[in-house]
Image (cartoon, rainbow, N blue to C red):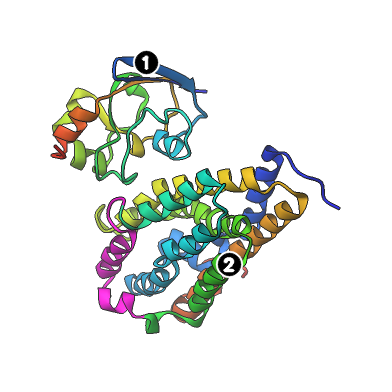
Amino acid sequence: MPRVVFHKHDQVFGDDVAENSNLVVRAGIRKFPFPHLTYGCGMGKCGKCACQVLAGGDDLPAPNWKETKRLGQRIDGGFRLMCQLWITHDIELSQDDALNAAATGQI
Amino acid sequence: MPELMDPITFRTALENAIKGKSANKSPFSIAWADGRLSRAHLARWAENHYHYVGPFAEYLAYVYARLPAHMTEAKDFMLSNMYEEEIGGDRHTDLLIRFAESCGTTGARVKDPDNMSPTTRGLQSWCYAVAMREDPIVAIAGLVVGLESQVPSIYRRQTPTLREKYKFTDEEVEFFDLHIVSDEIHGERGYQIVLAHADTPDLQQRCLKICEVGAQMRLLYTTALYHDYVEADLPLRDLDIAA
């Protein structure tokens, strides 16, 4: 089972998830990374679930058209939309809500 | 007399109840996946599908109102599903209309209830009846587990085809993309509620039965779409299936 390590607000959380888990789907049913993972629309539009991939990014598929459209140049900094990813390998992520809000013009 | 199943056994039983009559097996779905439908066929699908999925938040609202107050998490899950369906991001039916327009029909035609087939009207009515009349846990099993949770597997199969064989753009098929994610969340919430609250053998059996009936209703609907709009152009013998 893939191991997910999740950094938020200077804290680190971790748990194993079933292969092919979508972290937004899991948070939607109140399983880890709930309540730490912030998400919104679940459809690749709002950008609230964006996370920076700290490790394990090489095992992810290339960003899809929604991630490219929503994240733009942030992709080069290792950002991905969690609602668009199904996790198959160990991964380490960091999420900063203030950064996401600034990047999507929500503040 | 059936015994009370543990959650893992019960979930497997629910999945099997749905699988037996999956809409993936309908001639319409097979023709779709094989790239054999025309844009006009897909337009008729959209004009019907709107009247089935358009009121989904309304179906859930009836169930939400009838869930006992102490089932707080179940009520919250239902409310989240309703919110996400309508105003969490883009309204899902707006994206369906965008797809319909790319198939050559109009938003006005899609919204006009006179353009749905009698079978679609039957499916919509069944959804309302279940929402209003069944035990709320059984209703969630039928509507969310039996119907909504099927959607990711259907669209995973159909969406690549829409891009590769039918040559739709990413924006035109966004309705299908979002459902792969959002219906997975919604379906999982349905499973969580049913697994937690169907706590007697009788309730479990009723949940299994309604999943089976819900899957039959969806299969009936998609099969009727084939007979009403496609068969004249694409007979069964040309589809390599026996229906």
Q: Residue at x 59, y 66 (%)?
A: B241
Residue at screen point 64% across, 47% down: B197
Residue type highlighted by circle 1 = Val
Q: Quadrant of residue A14?
A: top left
Q: Chain of mark 2?
A: B
> Is residue B109 one of those drawn in magenta?
yes
Q: Is residue B79 visible?
A: yes
SS at mark 1?
strand
Give residue A52's quadrant in the image.
top left
Chain under numbered label 1: A
Left or right of residue A80, residue B73 in this image: right
> Label 2 sits on what residue type?
Val
Quadrant showing the C terminus of chain A: top left
Vertical order, B97 against B176 (above or below): below
Return the x and y of residue A75 as percentages of the image width and height.
20, 30
Residue B188 horizontal side relative to residue B89, left or right: right
The residue where tag 1 is placed is A12
Give the residue displayed 42% in from the left and 28% down from the top: A33
Report the front residue among B8 and A38. Answer: A38
- Give B230 or B124, whichever is nearer the viewer: B124
- Residue under pointer 2: B130
The image position of residue B4, as x and y in percent, is 77, 45
Q: Residue at x 45, y 69 (%)?
A: B52
Q: Secondary structure at mark 2?
A: helix
Q: How many marks?
A: 2
User: Could you tell me if residue B235 is visible in this image?
Assistant: no
Instruction: Give the magenta-colored segment's residue range.
Output: B88-112
Instruction: Assign the magenta stretch its main secondary structure.
Output: helix
Q: Quadrant of residue B53?
A: bottom left
